[in-house]
Amino acid sequence: MEGKANLEAAIEQLQIVEKQMRLAGDVAGTKKAVTEILQLCFEAKDWKTLNDQITLLSKKRGQLKQAVTAMVQQAMQYIDETLDLDTRIELIKTLNSIYVEIERARLIRKLAKIKEEQGLIAEAADLMQEVAVETFGAMAKTEKIAFILEQV
């Protein structure tokens, strides 16, 4: 119980810093604050708090796009570290609710792979078909081609 209280206190302190940085327009400071919050949740293996913080931080008024992108990229690294499938799927769904173009396509691909492994082929195919990677200018051509081939 004490660990949970310490985690909440640390997150609260970092949220104050994040707000100051965000309002000042400090991209580097904001990115550092949001990624540290996620790192604390990950180290504590508190997946529910991690999901809650991702949602909360991404919806803050005036949140910097670079901070959201950094946060999503960091949280994507945690997907394979989750212990059970339900937690993994929940984290992917949380990250999918935040629209970051390329990362979202990669998350959909991971979720489709999980569905395929569960034998839910039609559901996996539906997930893959909803992503229009051909319109993504920032995605590398090789990754885009691989994604389209998988869709087919």
Image (cartoon, rainbow, N blue to C red):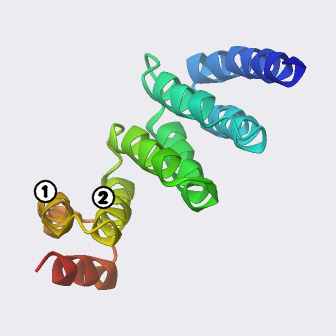
Q: Secondary structure at mark 1?
A: loop
Instruction: Give the total number of marks visible in the rendering.
Output: 2
Q: Residue at x 15, y 75 (%)?
A: 151
The vertical placement of 92 against 97, above or below, is below
Mark number displayed over residue 64: none
Residues under numbered marks 1 and 2 in contact, where contact means CB atoms less than 8 Å apart: yes
Mark number displayed over residue 130: 1
What's the residue type where badge 1 is placed? Glu
Quadrant of image for the N terminus: top right
Most foreground residue, 101 or 94: 94
| Mark 2 Cα shell of 10 Å, populated few (<14), some (14-19), many (≥20) | many
Q: Position of residue 14 (x, y in %)?
A: 74, 22
Residue at label 2? Answer: 108
What's the residue type where badge 2 is placed? Ile
The vertical placement of 51 against 1, above or below, is below
Q: Position of residue 34 (x, y in %)?
A: 64, 33
Most foreground residue, 106 or 92: 92
